[in-house]
Amino acid sequence: MQLFYSTNTTENQLILEEEEHRHVLVLRKNVGDLLEVTDGKGSHHKVTILEVKKQQTVCQIDSTNIEPQKQGRYIHLLIAPTKQIDRIEWMFEKLVEMGAINEITFIKTKYTERSNLNISRFQKIAISAIKQSLQFYLPKINQLIDFKTALNEVGKSVTNLIGHCYTGIEKEPLDKIQLSELESVNVWIGPEGDFSEEEVQVAIKLNMKTIDLGKERLRTETAGLKSVMVLKSIV
Amino acid sequence: MQLFYSTNTTENQLILEEEEHRHVLVLRKNVGDLLEVTDGKGSHHKVTILEVKKQQTVCQIDSTNIEPQKQGRYIHLLIAPTKQIDRIEWMFEKLVEMGAINEITFIKTKYTERSNLNISRFQKIAISAIKQSLQFYLPKINQLIDFKTALNEVGKSVTNLIGHCYTGIEKEPLDKIQLSELESVNVWIGPEGDFSEEEVQVAIKLNMKTIDLGKERLRTETAGLKSVMVLKSIV
């Protein structure tokens, strides 16, 4: 099965553009061929190609089902982007392919080495990953924002877990954290140089729980990967 | 803390060569400086630099501790290498950084798209990953071998789990598999085109258990990553 992506629909028609259109050309699909298409919001369209134009493929929508969303807790990863951006892109691709992540926010902390980020690349990675893995829901992807702005916006809701490497500040092993079965979680992962001690203290004052990801000293993207995967499997 | 790697030791001396020697130069370490070095087999040497030569750094061993090995089941991943080798390299780097994998074997199956593999690159990735994450044990890395040879060599020992995508062949969700606490596991992951149906049937005849990695259609490296991480956390 091949899955295509489009949000460009009218009542009866659906348009495939840019990469999706090129994908049609590469696969030598033509008028009358049947395709399956998602909008990344749960829709599963079955369509028939009406016309393959130069820049777009026009399809007729034959049927639309809403696929059920994957069960499990809602996990929002807030993470400092790595200097080598491909490291965090890989992590994100894998988490999306596994259907393990619901939302990601990139945070600018004291020691974050990037002040800008091309969010559209992450959007493309997510679309490619859900097509690859035959999923129908895209995770939410948020812009790079200041750590303190992020704290104010989401730090007061749901359960917040923050990873750090300071031996002087208490922390609980991630796999020992008590969470109810479908409890939503925000998990915060710092940059290569860790959160600053002050940042961790501010988080603690907001009642965020500090977590220990194990004995190994993990890179940022490995910490992001591990924390989300462990949280996805904890009941 | 910086960790170096060397297996070149005599009773009192230790030599750092090639990348490890270059690392000494980059960090501008000099005679009299103290370093920490592992051999990837549990040794944790504390050494003093005696001489920085053109091609190597000679050190005096001040003390050697044997670090305890990480507890948990022994996990041996047998996996078909991907055509784009960086994908499987990245998976391997992450699994080593997390201390999640004990042994890896690359297998040549009916649909494997590679007939050769540069094992020394994987050795380098493993060394770099244990240094980065401050671990003292390297995983065992085996050459690319035929699936059937691998079956004969390890398929009859311990518990063997094999992933496949055939809907007509029964399989059990990976997280429901019953394993005792420290039970060793061989987990088998096929190439982009999956194991052949015949390969799966041969495995079943050898009493290997077939596993289901979830609803998502996973790439080879994502399946390897997920299966090892889930097995590491199952009691």
Image (cartoon, coloured by chain):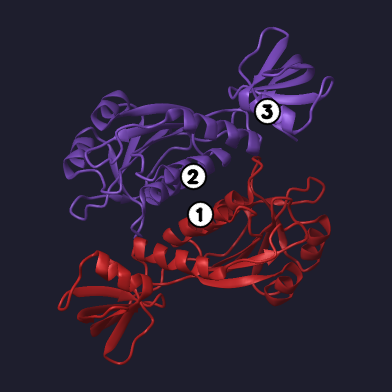
Chain colours: A red, B purple
Residues B101 and A149: in front is A149
The answer, for residue A73, to whether it is visible in the render is no
Residues A39 and B226: in front is A39
Residue that numbered label 3 is attached to: B22
Q: Is residue B129 above or below residue B153?
A: below
Please give the chain letter of the residue carrying mark 1.
A
Residue contact between numbered discs 2 and 1, judged by CB atoms under 8 Å: yes
Of the numbered discs 3 and 2, the one sitting upstream in the chain is 3
Q: Which mark is residue B90?
A: 2
User: Is label 3 in a helix, a strand or a loop?
Assistant: helix
Q: Amino acid at mark 3?
A: Arg
Q: Amino acid at mark 2?
A: Trp
Q: Amino acid at mark 1?
A: Trp
**Is the residue marked by circle 1 packed among few (<14), some (14-19), or many (20+) residues within 10 Å?**
some
Residue drawn where x is 58% and y is 28% of the image: B137
Estimate the spatial distance between the alpha carbons at disc 1 and disc 3, rounded to whole Å. 28 Å
Task: Name the spot of residue B28 as percent of width and height, x first.
Answer: 79, 30
Q: Is residue B54 above or below residue A187?
A: above
Q: How many numbered circles does the render carry? A: 3
The quadrant where residue A134 appears: bottom left
Task: Give the mark toward the camera: 3 or 2.
Answer: 3
Residue that numbered label 1 is attached to: A90
Task: Give the mark toward the camera: 1 or 3.
Answer: 3
Please give the chain letter of the residue carrying mark 3.
B
